[in-house]
């Protein structure tokens, strides 16, 4: 009964968050006057997203201490693109390890050149911008923290629909049971082929939709996400990403993918917290 009650309350909370988003088009302006989302997002003047990826690839140095510990992952660094095209107010909004966070912050602060400022209703405004800095060890995937004994069962044919939460730890306990720890990220795959990625903030009780689009299952073990817009990974906007998946159990899903401009495949495990047949949240692409 506890599990059912928790799932129901979580669904109510998520739906309320989605309704507030649809009605208010999210909190668009911070108290300091910085916009979170605008009609025209800022653009890096030296090659756009490709220019940024080239700079990061050439500049990032993998900290020795992180390599020795086998630590890897994506650090999200946020900054403000001001009305004059300069950038300031750098901070790590999702860290991995102190050494990786420090290196990511150093590199992003050093991005050369100016930006084409963002615009809202034709007017230049300061905009918050987030860049993912990827750290990958050779031969290791993003699932390094997950148990190596977790394996995909090819005989399981379960639906993709539902609300999924990312796992930071999955350890089999036997008899179909698992010790699972989860992170603050949700993926909503609706029955009418819409998808939403969400970041949950435990501290302030708010949630942010970080990406939205549609998805389509193309085979027994692949599906394609067509991203309309992504806040955390801007390079995904307008792209079709092919993902390979397999079920560990009916409610545990392993997903493998490669982000544009990243030479190494990533792997994640998600746990389904709400059952299938979820109807489309009332969110229109233009409100994001």
Image (cartoon, rainbow, N blue to C red):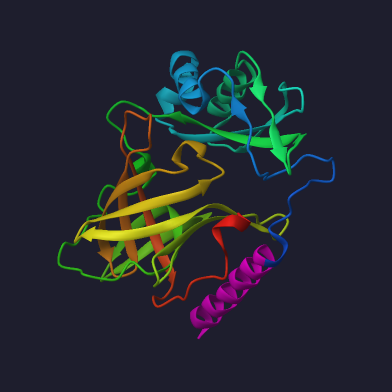
Residue 20 position (above or below residue 114) = below
Q: Position of residue 193 (x, y in %)?
A: 39, 66
What residue lies at 56% left-to-right and 21% top-to-bottom?
Answer: 103
Number of disc labels: 0
Q: Main secondary structure of the magenta part?
A: helix
Q: Position of residue 182 (x, y in %)?
A: 48, 57
Q: Specify the quadrant of the image occupied by residue 171.
A: bottom left
Q: Residue at x 55, y 80 (%)?
A: 8
Locate residue 266: give its quadrant.
top left
Residue 228 is situated, as x and y percent measured from the top left of the image, at 48, 50
Q: Quadrant of residue 180?
A: bottom left
Residue found farthest to the front: 122
Observer-nearest of 56 and 99 = 56
Q: Residue at x 57, y 37 (%)?
A: 95
> Is 5 a magenta residue?
yes
Q: Is residue 261 left or right of residue 256?
A: right
Image side of residue 34 versus residue 245, left or right: right
Which residue is situated farthest in the bottom direction here? 1
Report if residue 64 lies within the magenta region: no
Q: Using the image, determine if residue 261 lies above or below residue 141.
A: above
Quarter of the image that includes the C terminus: bottom right
**Does residue 234 appear anywhere in the picture?**
yes
188 over 7 or under it: above or below: above
| Residue that lies at the very extreme toward the left in this rendered image | 155
The magenta region covers: 1-22
Horizontally, is 226 left or right of 133 in the view? left
The residue located at (53%, 81%) in the rendering is 2
Q: Is residue 186 visible?
A: no
x then y, percent, for residue 18: 61, 67
The residue closer to the viewer here, 269 or 109, is 109
């Amino acid at each position: 009964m506890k599990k059912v009650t928790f799932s129901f309350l979580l669904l109510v909370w998520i739906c309320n968050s989605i309704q507030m988003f649809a009605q208010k088009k999210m909190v668009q302006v911070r108290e300091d006057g910085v916009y979170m989302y605008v009609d025209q997002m800022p653009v890096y003047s030296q090659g756009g997203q490709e220019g940024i990826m080239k700079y990061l690839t050439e500049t990032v140095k993998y900290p020795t201490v992180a390599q020795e510990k086998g630590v890897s992952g994506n650090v999200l660094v946020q900054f403000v693109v001001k009305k004059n095209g300069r950038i300031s107010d750098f901070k790590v909004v999702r860290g991995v390890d102190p050494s990786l966070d420090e290196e990511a912050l150093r590199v992003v602060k050093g991005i050369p050149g100016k930006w084409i400022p963002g615009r809202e209703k034709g007017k230049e405004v300061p905009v918050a911008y987030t860049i993912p800095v990827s750290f990958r060890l050779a031969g290791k995937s993003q699932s390094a923290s997950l148990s190596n004994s977790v394996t995909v069962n090819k005989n399981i044919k379960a639906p993709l629909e539902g609300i999924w939460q990312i796992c930071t730890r999955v350890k089999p306990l036997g008899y179909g049971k698992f010790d699972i720890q989860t992170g603050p990220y949700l993926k909503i795959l609706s029955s009418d082929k819409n998808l939403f990625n969400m970041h949950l903030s435990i501290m302030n009780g708010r949630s942010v939709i970080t990406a939205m689009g549609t998805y389509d299952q193309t085979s027994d073990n692949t599906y394609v996400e067509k991203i309309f817009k992504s806040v955390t990974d801007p390079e995904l906007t307008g792209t079709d990403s092919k993902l390979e998946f397999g079920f560990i159990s009916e409610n545990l899903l392993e997903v493998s993918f490669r982000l544009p401009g990243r030479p190494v495949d990533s792997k994640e495990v998600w746990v389904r917290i709400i059952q299938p047949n979820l109807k489309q949240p009332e969110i229109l692409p233009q409100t994001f």
